[in-house]
Image: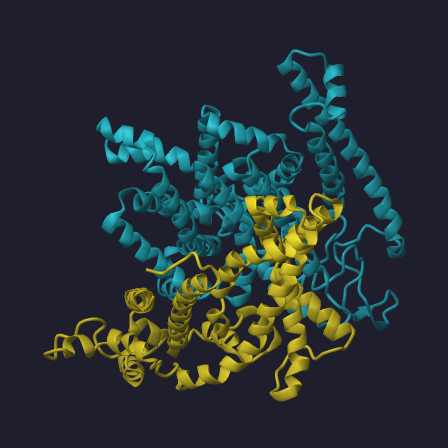
């Protein structure tokens, strides 16, 4: 197992390098640093001197991939690619275009992001599984049919509508919680209640329907027939046997997204004014701050790969039949 | 005199239309595709959703025939064309497009949303809600708008019922002709739901659709049936124009991604070895980049590129269209990985089958095996994925437009409508109609697309086949 994990971690390096090359090509090959400088300084009437100054201040004044003017290993290290992209492997994210330390911002904003994403994930999982179990328990009845119709209708509504309707009803009409904002400590609860509730509700449609299919697939297996044949009550079959076995696909599907929870939710955070990584990313996109976007892309890919490795580990933990070689 | 304009997305839409037609012609001769297709047509949900989706597609196609009208020119001078690009839908909805108010007005309102200084006939000036320029302008007494609307609706419904009856008769006559039966027996069979294809469900949906569409068309000229927005444009017209944007994103994205996904997926599974490693590496890398960020980065790049090359686009429409096309392309690049992985798995399984081994033994070339034996046998996976992806892409457009990396701000889309409506909710009295219009049209499209996708999946997925 150790050897397997080691191999997976080593395999992550070429992937992350690939991610860096893709973002680098997107950012620097399609648009040269000159273009970026021109855009950041305003389009018209810029002297070459101003562009050079902007580039020098932000370290874009070196060759992109290969520096022929120096010798030795420096031909590769004294370049924009090495300084801006490879250094991210050491978690050195550098400074955003407006001069702030990106790593510090990320550390500060991770907390609020998790404060929303974690409850949404946990509560959502519980609610979806409960809802799905209920539909499966009453399968092939009108209740099941109504549940499926509700799920399809709910997943056909854009997430934006849930947020807008929720903010309007709960905050504006009923005045229960503030419309947006964030505070530390216990005060955080009143700011987080609504976004978490909306996050859970908007996920029910797709989630519950997916788990229902999983449960139904499990219901068709031989061990379920055996359990019924030996006279177990439907309750016992569903909760002791089906739920336990269906947990394998559920768990492995859920584990992969856990690390990504750190990234926060782009839409929810920006609607509710929560100073997390999601709203940081949106602000960076709107301000066209490439340094921040690049750092977030790297972080996201890293967390995704961590999620894949965790999934493999969780497989072996919940299903003894699987061994990692 | 008009000058036809073919925008990038128009060309692709018609290419897609040709591809779909070709697929149906091909599928009719292939039993493994023909039977599931027949099952889709024989399902009631499938029939209902097909009728509704056809209505959306009709609007989208009308909006895809673009042209530039000629300007009135002096005799002897050459014909000059307007800079504005119009579509057939624009032409048909000219009253909707041109009758702009000053600012917001509620649905069916005859008065503006905000008070203004109005000059009375006797010369005094008071602050009051002024009459709208077009909405309800024919009314002598604006208080009586409800009865006017009711009378007009009644007329429209009568017309709708008559048209629908004609359509139903035409369908029955067609069926009777094909099955060599009499009109009356066919008519009865359709109404008792005894036909293999659920024509009754389809006709009832069509009837409901007519009952909604006819009054909407007839009332939209004298009134603004869904109100007007901040700059006084008709919201109903905007949401109609948004249909094309939604459809384009949902379909063209798939068209862009299909060649990659199908070719790479099958190659990875069939050739194995280093080709498999390379393709797996490629899609793991792309998959590990958070989708929204990759799209955002690519769209930002394109914006910079478009700003530095403004002379490539001769009209605003061409510019917005180029952006839409690019958005489809980048969405396609980020979304082909799922299908590619599925196809790789299927190809891995299929390459060990006896008939492929036999083809090998006969010395059939690799590409011929892929084209003749593998591709037809993964067709159902491709079809299911294409249909299932559609609704997700329509929803994604709204989110991306909100983030600011969606379609061009000058292009009508549901995302842009929601985005502008977000701030209007805070006004007092609330401006709810933009949001409601976007919600209704988007919800209906996505809902029926989801239902249709479920039918297609049930029909084509061998695991669910009874």
User: Residue B192's spot in the image, x, y percent?
Assistant: 76, 24
Residue B425 can be seen, yes or no? no
Q: Nearer the viewer, residue B316 or A159?
A: A159
Residue drawn at 24 percent across, 79 percent down: A61
Which chain corresponds to the colour yellow? A
- Above or below: residue A7 compared with residue A137: below
What residue is at 62 percent from the left and 75 percent from the top? A272
> Which residue is at the far left?
A71
Point out residue A178 in the picture as x, y percentages from the top left corner. Answer: 70, 80
Q: Which residue is outermost to the bottom?
A: A185
Q: How is the image coloured?
A: by chain
Rendered position, B253 above or below B290: above
Q: Which of B448 and B355 is in front in this view?
A: B355
Q: Which of A252 and B254 is in front in this view?
A: A252
Tell me which corner region of the image, top left, top right, bottom left or bottom right, holds residue A293. Answer: bottom left
Asked if residue A197 lies left or right of residue B286, the reply is: right
- Residue A325 in percent (x, y) is at 32, 60
């Amino acid at each position: 197992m150790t050897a397997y994990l080691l191999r997976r971690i080593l395999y992550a390096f070429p992937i992350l390098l690939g991610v860096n090359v893709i973002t680098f090509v997107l950012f620097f090959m399609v648009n040269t640093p000159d273009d970026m400088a021109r855009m950041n300084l305003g389009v018209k009437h810029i002297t070459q001197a101003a562009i050079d100054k902007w580039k020098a201040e932000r370290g874009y004044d070196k060759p992109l991939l290969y520096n022929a003017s120096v010798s030795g290993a420096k031909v590769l290290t004294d370049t924009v690619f090495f300084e801006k992209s490879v250094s991210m492997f050491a978690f050195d994210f550098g400074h955003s275009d407006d001069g702030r330390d990106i790593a510090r911002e990320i550390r500060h904003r991770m907390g609020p992001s998790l404060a929303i994403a974690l409850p949404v994930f946990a509560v959502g999982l519980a609610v979806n599984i409960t809802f799905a179990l209920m539909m499966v328990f009453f399968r092939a009845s009108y209740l099941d049919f109504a549940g499926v119709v509700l799920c399809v209708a709910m997943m056909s509504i854009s997430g934006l509508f849930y947020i807008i309707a929720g903010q309007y009803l709960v905050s504006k009409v009923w005045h229960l919680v503030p419309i947006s904002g964030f505070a530390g400590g216990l005060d955080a609860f009143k700011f987080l209640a609504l976004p978490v509730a909306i996050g859970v509700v908007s996920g029910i449609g797709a989630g519950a329907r997916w788990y229902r299919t999983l449960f139904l697939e499990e219901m068709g297996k031989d061990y379920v027939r055996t359990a019924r044949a030996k006279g177990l009550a439907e309750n016992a079959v569903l909760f002791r046997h089906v739920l336990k076995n269906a947990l394998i696909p559920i768990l492995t599907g859920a584990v992969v997204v856990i690390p990504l929870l750190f990234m926060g939710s782009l839409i929810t955070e920006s609607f509710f004014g929560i100073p997390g990584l999601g709203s940081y990313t949106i602000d960076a996109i709107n301000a066209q701050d490439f340094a921040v976007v690049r750092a977030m892309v790297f972080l996201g890919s890293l967390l995704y790969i961590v999620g894949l490795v965790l999934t493999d580990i969780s497989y072996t933990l919940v299903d003894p039949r699987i061994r990692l070689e | 005199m008009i000058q036809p304009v073919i925008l990038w997305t128009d060309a692709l839409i018609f290419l897609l239309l040709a591809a779909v037609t070709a697929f149906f012609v091909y599928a009719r001769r292939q039993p493994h595709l023909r039977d599931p297709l027949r099952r889709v047509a024989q399902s009631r949900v499938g029939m209902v959703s097909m009728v509704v989706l056809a209505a959306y597609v009709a609007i989208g196609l009308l909006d895809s025939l673009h042209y530039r009208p000629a300007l009135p020119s002096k005799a002897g001078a050459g014909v000059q064309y307007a800079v504005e690009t119009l579509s057939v839908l624009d032409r048909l909805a000219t009253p909707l497009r041109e009758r702009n108010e000053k600012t917001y007005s509620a649905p069916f309102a005859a008065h503006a949303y905000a008070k203004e200084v109005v000059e009375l006939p006797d010369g005094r000036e008071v602050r009051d809600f002024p009459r709208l320029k077009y909405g309800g302008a024919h009314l002598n007494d604006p208080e009586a708008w409800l009865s006017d609307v009711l009378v007009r609706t009644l007329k429209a419904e009568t017309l709708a019922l008559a048209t629908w009856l004609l359509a139903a008769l035409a369908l029955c006559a067609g069926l009777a002709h094909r099955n060599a039966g009499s009109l009356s027996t066919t008519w009865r069979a359709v109404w008792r739901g005894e036909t293999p294809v659920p024509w009754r469900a389809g006709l009832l949906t069509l009837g409901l659709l007519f009952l909604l569409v006819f009054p909407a068309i007839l009332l939209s000229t004298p009134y603004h049936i869904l109100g007007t927005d901040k700059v006084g444009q008709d919201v109903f017209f905007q949401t109609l124009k948004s249909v094309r944007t939604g459809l384009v994103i949902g379909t063209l994205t798939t068209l862009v991604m299909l060649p990659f996904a199908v070719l790479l997926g099958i190659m990875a599974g069939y050739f194995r070895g280093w080709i498999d490693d390379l393709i797996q590496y490629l899609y793991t890398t792309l998959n590990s980049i958070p989708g929204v960020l990759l799209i955002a980065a690519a769209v930002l790049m394109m914006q910079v590129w478009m700003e530095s090359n403004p002379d490539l686009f001769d009209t605003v429409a061409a510019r917005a269209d180029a952006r839409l096309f690019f958005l489809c392309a980048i969405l396609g690049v980020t979304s082909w990985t799922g299908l590619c992985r599925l196809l790789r798995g299927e190809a891995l399984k299929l390459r060990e089958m006896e008939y492929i081994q036999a083809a090998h033994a006969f010395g059939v070339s690799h590409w011929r095996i892929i084209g003749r034996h593998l591709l037809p046998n993964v067709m159902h996976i491709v079809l299911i994925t294409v249909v299932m992806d559609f609704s997700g892409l329509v929803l994604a457009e709204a989110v991306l437009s909100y983030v600011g990396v969606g379609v061009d701000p000058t292009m009508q889309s549901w995302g842009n409508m929601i985005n502008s409506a977000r701030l209007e909710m805070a006004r007092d009295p609330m401006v709810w109609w933009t949001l409601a219009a976007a919600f209704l049209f988007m919800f209906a499209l996505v809902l029926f697309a989801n239902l249709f996708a479920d039918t297609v999946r049930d029909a084509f997925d061998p695991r669910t086949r009874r």
